[in-house]
Amino acid sequence: MKYSNKGFIFTRCSFTWGYGLVCYYSFFKSSDFHTLIFQTSYLDRGMELIWEKLTNRDNEYFNSYEELIEEIGDSELQRNYYHDQTLEIVSKMLIDICKKFESLGITVYFIHATDIYKHIDYIKERTIKISHKEKEYFCINNISDDDSSAIIALDFDNFKGTPPDDLHPSLKVHESIYKSILNKLDND
């Protein structure tokens, strides 16, 4: 890809869920951007945004987010039931949004925190694989499964004493993400 004076859109980090971009949308036109890089997060972090679309086992919609949370409770079976529904709804929303950007001439890529989207072709085909320590990964969690220093809480190389108790990716993983994005953009 040839770089131009157009910008990138990065959205949906674990802190913002993409909310922040809405505040700026009116300031920019789609012609201001050439690339959207969408970072998917943990699926349950989005349930608050889509609870109205979920149905219980009686095929009834919930009256509130709190009702959904009460229904799920501590049950692994319930969590799995709503996980599958949530994945289907969120995947469709993601694909619809990204197709809109693509129709405007904006290239779409994904980076993932988890591997939940690895079987969804549209998303998988646009995923930037992360190269870290000479191995290629689909998602950030797979890196931390292989490399114990891949999270901030265990990154003793970059902190004097005890690192902060934080499970986000370490500085080295962020560097791997950055290099993987540049490599993908340079080769497309």
Image (spheres, grey):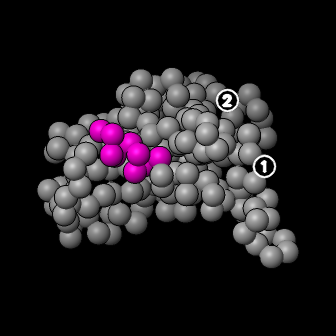
Secondary structure under the numbered disc 2 in the rendered image = helix
Q: Which mark is residue 148?
A: 1
Q: Quadrant of the N terminus?
A: top left
Disc count in the image? Answer: 2
Nearer the observer, 71 or 169 = 169
Q: Residues within 10 Å of mark 2 (few under 14, many from 20)?
A: few
Estimate the spatial distance between the alpha carbons at disc 1 and disc 2, rounded to whole Å.
Answer: 27 Å
Q: Is residue 141 visible?
A: no
Q: Amino acid at mark 2?
A: Asn
Question: Where is residue 109 drawn, in percent x and y?
Answer: 37, 42
Where does the magenta region start and end? 180-188
Nearer the observer, 117 or 134 = 134
Residue at figure coordinates x 63%, y 62% from the top left = 171
Q: Which mark is residue 107?
A: none
Question: Where is residue 86 drawn, in percent x and y?
Answer: 53, 35
Q: Which mark is residue 80?
A: 2
Residue at figure coordinates x 48%, y 52% from the top left = 179
Looking at the image, residue 59 lies above or below residue 50: above
